[in-house]
Image: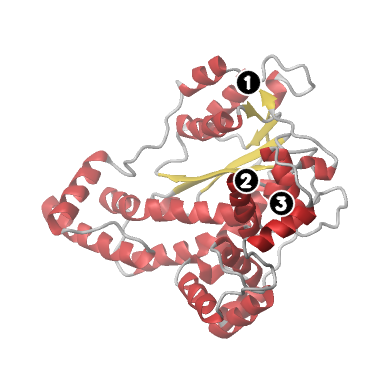
Amino acid sequence: MTNRNKLIEIYFHLGLEYKDIVNILIAKHKILLSERTLKRTLQRQGLFRRKNYTNLQEVVAFIRRELQGSGSCHGYRWMFEKCKLNGLNVRKEHVRVILSLVDPIGTEMRRARRLSRRSYFSKGPNYIWHMDSYDKLRPFGLCINGCIDGFARKLCWLNAYRTSSDPRVIGGYFVETVKSLQGCPRIVRADRGTENCYVREFQRFLRRNGSDAFAEERSFMYGSSNHNQRIESFWGFLRKECIEFWLEFFHGMKNEGYFDGTFLDVNLVLFCFLGLIQDELDRTADVWNTHIISPSKNENVPHGRPNVMYFVPELYNTKNYTQGITQDDLDECEEECIFRGSIPCDEDVFRLCSFIMAKRHLTLSHDAYSGLELYLVLREVLSVLNE
């Protein structure tokens, strides 16, 4: 009972509707209960949708903190989802009004932006994955790679590292996800970049014994990046809600003469900021996977929350298309991969930075601006040592 109540509390704070909580508990946790029982349980736990709202001063303080980073790119709907994910019980209208008051310029700029896309449809979860690399931060040494489910639009992975061109690293992202699922998708779609060749071979190897029309060679599809619609659409959201802040931040460093693209500067950026970027991507993925995708003009395209569409496809009259794999096949793929470790940059630079930090009693940064302070200290010390 305690475990059930804890799960109910978690899904409640994720902002899921009652029917979605019930369906996920049944499908994912094999816990059977009615909406009426769910509401009584929530009432006993003191959890209400329209009661116990968070003090607005606390909400304003949270939004102000978010506006100091990539939150400055958020519209009120996305900020509302972040508030919920951080345990703040607030009305969406209040978030809209707060944003318009504390960030009027940003609100007007976001209001003017629009995005249109072609129609697209996938049969069900894990029927097709779309993967690609995002290179806007690559000049600063930060390489992002992501994969999204074509049906649910749930992110399979969203990772930052010092390279996105090593196929063994990209293969590692794929294998980690397949391992957690204990299965692979029916189809993977990517562009013709050499970084995707290991994923291509892994997918075809895992699907070599399939009996459907997309087994073996046809289980991996090539297509140009601009036609890989699902992931390309997400990159637009990622830039607007997250990366725009970091682009302006790093270009500001460059314009101030704090970054010139040298080996040292690139590795210091990785040392000071890679963890922050990955934390931000993780938070963005969490919000994305729990936010509501609006209805499309194409009636065949499902809408709702990615996590719900992914874990409870029965609500959309479809099924999960995960393809079974064997542990031996997975182990064989793992042997060919490189997985991200705890060292974010060149090992020599990492050891020197760690030594300087220990000597000067410095700590790792917790936001972009403290990261810049650490970066400048390390840059000054290492530049002197390099002379």
Residue 313 image position (x, y, % from top left): 77, 41
SS at circle 3: helix
| Colouring method of the image | secondary structure
**Could you tell me if the residues under marks 3 and 1 are in contact, i.e. CB atoms within 8 Å?**
no
Q: Amino acid at mark 3?
A: Ile
First along the sequence among labels 3 and 1: 3
- Distance between mark 1 and mark 2 Cα atoms: 34 Å
Residue 325 image position (x, y, % from top left): 63, 20
9 w.r.t. 73: above or below: above
Q: Amino acid at mark 2?
A: Met
- Say few, some or many: other residues with alpha carbon within 10 Å of mark 2 (under 14 / 14 to 19 / 20 or more): few
First along the sequence among labels 3 and 2: 2
Residue 43 visible within the image: yes
SS at circle 1: loop
**Could you tell me if the residues under marks 1 and 2 are in contact, i.e. CB atoms within 8 Å?**
no
Q: Which residue is mark 2?
A: 1
Residue positioned 68% across, 56% down in the render? 41
- Say few, some or many: other residues with alpha carbon within 10 Å of mark 3 (under 14 / 14 to 19 / 20 or more): many
Q: Where does the N terminus fall, quadrant-wise?
A: top right
Q: Nearer the viewer, residue 320 or 43?
A: 43
Q: Is residue 236 left or right of residue 34?
A: left
180 w.r.t. 21: above or below: above
Q: Is residue 347 left or right of residue 37?
A: left
Instruction: Identify the disc placed on residue 21.
Output: 3
Q: Which residue is mark 1?
A: 325
